[in-house]
Image: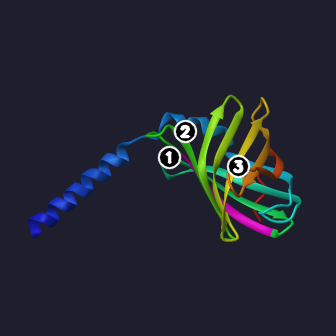
């Protein structure tokens, strides 16, 4: 029994050491321009995700977990009040796709994949809001200097009919002073 435990511990140590030696995939460098503080404003469209109306927000983006993932923490004020979210972006080298997972303080969540083409990011996935699942897709089109972008987000209840959920403009900014 002691021999089995020793072998298991040795195997776990070797696996952990091998995993630690890995470096983040070079594709992740494509996300570097997103690091920093962003502010945004936009308009939500009335639909299955809630009422329409203007919203504003800000987000901070940073590398986490030895540079394997990008974390975005956002705070937004809009038609349904204030809410916060955390997003984790990464790269799946086996499938050669960028991935995202978003979790909000109202219980909502979303996940999917993103694709890059020049200054455009397109994404698609699934979202859960108010206990219901939706399909989502969107496009972020960046300015040539990568310091701002327009964001269009769509939602579908059946995968056939798509409706606008919101449009926003995001701008890279200096972070607000700490209080």
Image point (66%, 44%), residue name: 123
Where does the image place residue 88, in percent across and percent down from the top left? 59, 54
Q: Is residue 27 left or right of residue 16?
A: right
Q: Which residue corresponds to mark 2?
A: 28
Which residue is at the far right?
Answer: 53
Q: Secondary structure at mark 3?
A: loop
Dot 3, crowdedness within 10 Å: few (<14), some or many (≥20)?
few
Cα distance in 3D space between marks 3 and 2: 32 Å
Residue closer to the observer: 76 or 117: 117
Q: CA distance from mark 1 to mark 2?
A: 7 Å
Element type where label 2 sits in the image: helix
Q: Quadrant of the C terminus?
A: bottom right
| Relative image position of residue 131 (x, y in whole percent) | 66, 71
From the viewer's perspective, tell me whether residue 16 is left or right of residue 62.
left
Bounds of the magenta segment: 82-90
Looking at the rendered image, the disc whose residue lies closer to the viewer, 3 or 2, is 3
């Amino acid at each position: 029994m002691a021999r089995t435990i020793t072998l298991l511990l040795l195997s776990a140590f070797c696996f952990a050491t091998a995993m630690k030696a890995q470096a983040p995939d070079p594709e992740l460098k494509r996300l570097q321009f997103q690091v920093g503080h962003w502010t945004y404003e936009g308009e939500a469209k009335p639909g299955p995700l809630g009422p329409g109306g203007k919203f504003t927000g800000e987000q901070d983006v940073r590398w986490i977990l030895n540079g394997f993932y990008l974390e975005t923490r956002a705070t937004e004020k809009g038609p349904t009040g204030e809410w916060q979210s955390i997003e984790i972006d990464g790269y799946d080298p086996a499938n050669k796709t960028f991935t995202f997972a978003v979790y909000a303080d109202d219980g909502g969540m979303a996940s999917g994949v993103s694709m890059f083409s020049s200054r455009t990011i397109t994404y698609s996935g699934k979202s859960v809001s108010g206990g219901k699942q939706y399909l989502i897709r969107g496009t972020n089109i960046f300015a040539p200097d990568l310091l701002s972008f327009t964001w269009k987000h769509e939602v579908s209840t059946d995968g056939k009919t798509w409706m606008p959920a919101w449009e926003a403009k995001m701008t890279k900014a200096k972070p607000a002073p700490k209080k």
